[in-house]
Image (cartoon, helix red, strand yellow):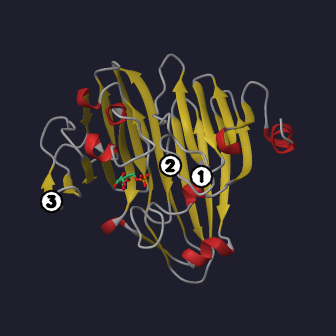
Amino acid sequence: MSDRIAQLNAQYGAAGRIAFREGEGGFTVAQLVCRYGACELSLYGGQVLSYRPVGHGPVLYLSPKAVFAEGKTIRGGIPICWPWFGKRAGSPSHGFARTSRWTLVETAYTDAYTEAVLGLKDTPETRAVWPYPFELKLVARLGDCLRLTLSCANTGDAPMPVTQAFHPYFRVRDIRRVRVSGLEGAACHDYVTDSDSVCGEGDWVAEGPTDRLVNPKANGCVIHDDGLGRKLTMTFSGARSLVVWNPWESGEKQMADLDPGAYTRFLCVEPVCTGVTALSIPPDGTASLSLAIQSANA
Ligand code: TA6
């Protein structure tokens, strides 16, 4: 065990509840356990890598070909897209938070939950690509659900433009046997066809490459996995939209970190602030985005 890991365990660990290990790529991973389940959180990227409630299978998909290397994105789990969502000329898509080394701020546990708090602040490197001082805090609370809260503070003296998302890869048995309820009647922009529409009544099903911005009427949806016989309920706050994404076979072929057929084993449903819901955080202002995920038998 490296000195760094030993120090983290000594200072922030708790027997049977919180432990740190050296993960792939030499990245530090926090292991959180409580009576309801377990999860792992990479300090590289502030990225949840796994979540498994007691009595249930893994909730998140992590590609067996995921790359764990400095400056690379990890395919799967729950990437944090910040301070921009999507593509940006001359920069990696989805911002630099998911390829940054976050610091551990604190850990806590009670009878009901186990929690880790990570932090990320601006550096000369971040200011070179994005000229705003900031402080990010991620609270990962594992209890009877997995709840993530990303809080962003503008520590500068100018308004800070932010688009952001949690980008969870929900594990499914077969995308072709998945239904999503809660999107009925939602206004939708389809990035694949560059067209606008309204989601029909009834559950949404994926029928091909999917990349769409949806404005659901409520702050959540349910992913019904008829293959696994379970449903994943996700609720969110601090956003009004969701991006629903699956690359399908055509998109998967463009991704070296996905095996052939991997597209059938996940669906991304992402609470997002982008477009008309993009943020402008005033000086000394804050904004937060939260996501809660719970698994239940269908
Ligand atoms: O989830 C929406 C999206 O922006 C898609 O357009 C696709 O690019 C996906 O994110 C994955 O992006 P990544 O940079 O992680 O490969």
Q: Position of residue 104 (x, y in %)?
A: 72, 50
Q: Secondary structure at mark 3?
A: strand
The residue at the far top in this view is: 55
At x 58%, y 25%, the residue is 37
Residue 256: tell me if it is visible. yes
Which residue bears the numbered disc 1? 45
Which residue bears the numbered disc 3? 196
Rate crowding at label 2 as few (under 14), some (14 to 19) or many (20 or more) other CA atoms within 10 Å.
many
Rate crowding at label 3 as few (under 14), some (14 to 19) or many (20 or more) other CA atoms within 10 Å.
some
**Distance from label 3 to label 2 (Cα)?**
27 Å
Image height of 22 relative to 277, above or below: above
* Mark 1 sits near ligand 1, with its Cβ under 8 Å away: no
Drawn side of residue 149 relative to residue 190, left or right: right
Tell me which amino acid carries mark 3: Asp
Label number found at residue 79: 2
* Mark 2 sits near ligand 1, with its Cβ under 8 Å away: yes
Q: Earlier in the sequence, mark 1 or mark 2?
A: 1
Tell me which amino acid carries mark 2: Pro
Drawn side of residue 67 relative to residue 235, left or right: right
Single out the mark in the foreground, 3 or 2: 2
Rate crowding at label 1 as few (under 14), some (14 to 19) or many (20 or more) other CA atoms within 10 Å.
many
Q: Position of residue 83 (x, y in %)?
A: 50, 66
**Distance from label 3 to label 1 (Cα)?**
33 Å
Q: Position of residue 238 (x, y in %)?
A: 43, 56
**Distance from label 1 to label 2 (Cα)?**
7 Å
Q: Position of residue 137 (x, y in %)?
A: 62, 56
* Pointers 1 and 2 in contact (C-beta within 8 Å): yes
